[in-house]
Image (cartoon, rainbow, N blue to C red):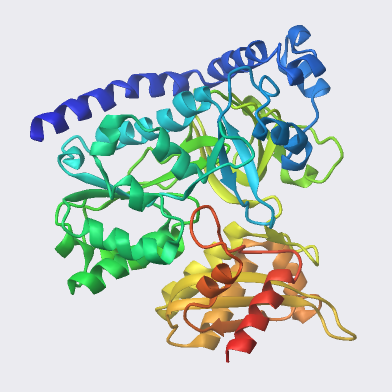
Amino acid sequence: MAIVNSIFTWLMKKRIHQIELFMKYPHDVQEEWFHTLIDSAENTEWGKRYDYKTILTVQQYQERVPIQNYDTLKPYIERMLNGEQNILWPSDIRWFAKSSGTTSDRSKFIPVSEESLEECHFKGGKDMLSIYCNNRPDNQMFTGKSLVLGGSHQVNQLNEDCFYGDLSAVLIKNLPIWAEFYRTPDMSIALMDNYEIKMDRMAEATINENVTSISGVPTWTIVLAKKVLELTGKSNLLEVWPNLEVYIHGAVNFTPYREQFKQLIPSADMYYLETYNASEGFFGIQDQDDSDEMLLMLDYGIFYEFIPMEHIGEENPKALVLGEVELYKNYAIVISTNGGLWRYMIGDTIQFTSLAPYRIKITGRTKHFINAFGEEVIIDNAEQALTKACQETGAEIKDYTAGPIYFKGEKAGGHEWIIEFDKQPDDFEKFVDIMDQTLREVNSDYDAKRFKDMALCRPKVHNAPAHTFYNWLKAKDKLGGQHKVPRLANERKYVEDILEMMKNAS
């Protein structure tokens, strides 16, 4: 296996030169991809509608094609689900990544073309390994197996030729044969629908394997880890898998989970690698081992635009191209892709932490914030406040959500939080005060509204019993896969729903 590991590591490192190329010439690479995408789609129904044949510049494209979201593309996608082709993209599309989103109850079906599978998602997966091998040349990752927490796979009944599942399932079903050899557990378990049974089966199937890497969403990885420790009677994962060396994660902010992982994997050498891989595309990879910023991947068949947060909600907001963005401003990402998404606003917000090369961090969702009183609290603010409060009170958070408390009579408004702890704070009131104070420090709008409790009162925080969010997701039939607890909402729907469930359970 050592020889195989050396060959794989050499192959992975070859790609580093190409990555360095787009880091050096980012605007040329993006311009080239823009023209490739437009030329490819000129004879599709969409390309004819917007006369792609006569589009010569990005400016013309921006003037001609309006900003899209799932609802505006949905009529086209529904036709594709029924088997129609050459609608948004010229090659046949047989696969759809099912995503619930985080703020909508409806399922979204994102078209996945052959090109987006090969040039985007799989390329991203390979690059993730290339970057790891480059940063850790003495790695032994390929001497063992990769434990992958996949999603669930179903056949779309609308058309026998069309398939859907959450993104990880679509990728697993399309991986080459050799990749299956390095994965555990086998596909029959990895793609199970019932997450409760699946976690048990995964634990049973992997405890005797030589697991060298784990990839998955932090929340489900922790659930699996606890099952493994329960089954084996061991105190940490290194006692079960002594050669475990890297954990690859994404989908949610890792900061609140970091302390738990240090306990589960007590090794200073453990490598943590974050990726930004959504149903719509693979966008970013953490390329430095001493920073959690992610390199924006520019040669994956995606053309990027960015809308400043202050223009979100305008009828035709001006979108900026890569060369126009500024450091540390919040932008909504807009993508045009080789999967047939055109000027599509994915709903995530990012900040640029570096412009040479372009590195980013995810700051939240365009619809995932609290701004009932002009305070504009985004997820990044919330995560910073919770991290500080945890550090100073010895707490560990499992899940949380928050929403506004509206003005009532003479009373000021506020924010209502439901927090489920893995480890309780040593002083709950101190936890709330530190959280509140940190929000004031990182968000001047929140601070102004909190002045003398004039517009916003001290946050009201509920200490939720164990399994609250798990039970809530289960009741909504949203366990596992792409389903996530909505962190912040600008209305009270989620908070009231969960509080009602807690009340009925007590």
User: Measured along the vertical axis of the image, is residue 17 above or below residue 361?
Assistant: above
Work out whether residue 435 can be spotted.
yes
Q: Residue furthest right?
A: 409
Report the residue at 36% width, 36% height from top.
Answer: 128
112 on left or right of 22 = right
256 on left or right of 182 = right
Along the line of sight, the residue nearer the viewer: 55 or 437: 55
List x then y, in percent, for residue 6: 14, 29
Report the residue at 67% width, 82% height from top.
Answer: 500
Q: Quadrant of the C terminus?
A: bottom right
List x then y, in percent, for residue 447: 70, 69
List x then y, in percent, for residue 440: 64, 69
User: Measured along the vertical axis of the image, is residue 61 above or below residue 307?
Assistant: above
Residue 422, image quadrant: bottom left
Counting every numbered tag in the picture gives: 0
User: Measured along the vertical axis of the image, is residue 270 above or below residue 263?
Assistant: above
Report the residue at 85% width, 78% height from top.
Answer: 407
List x then y, in percent, for residue 253: 49, 56
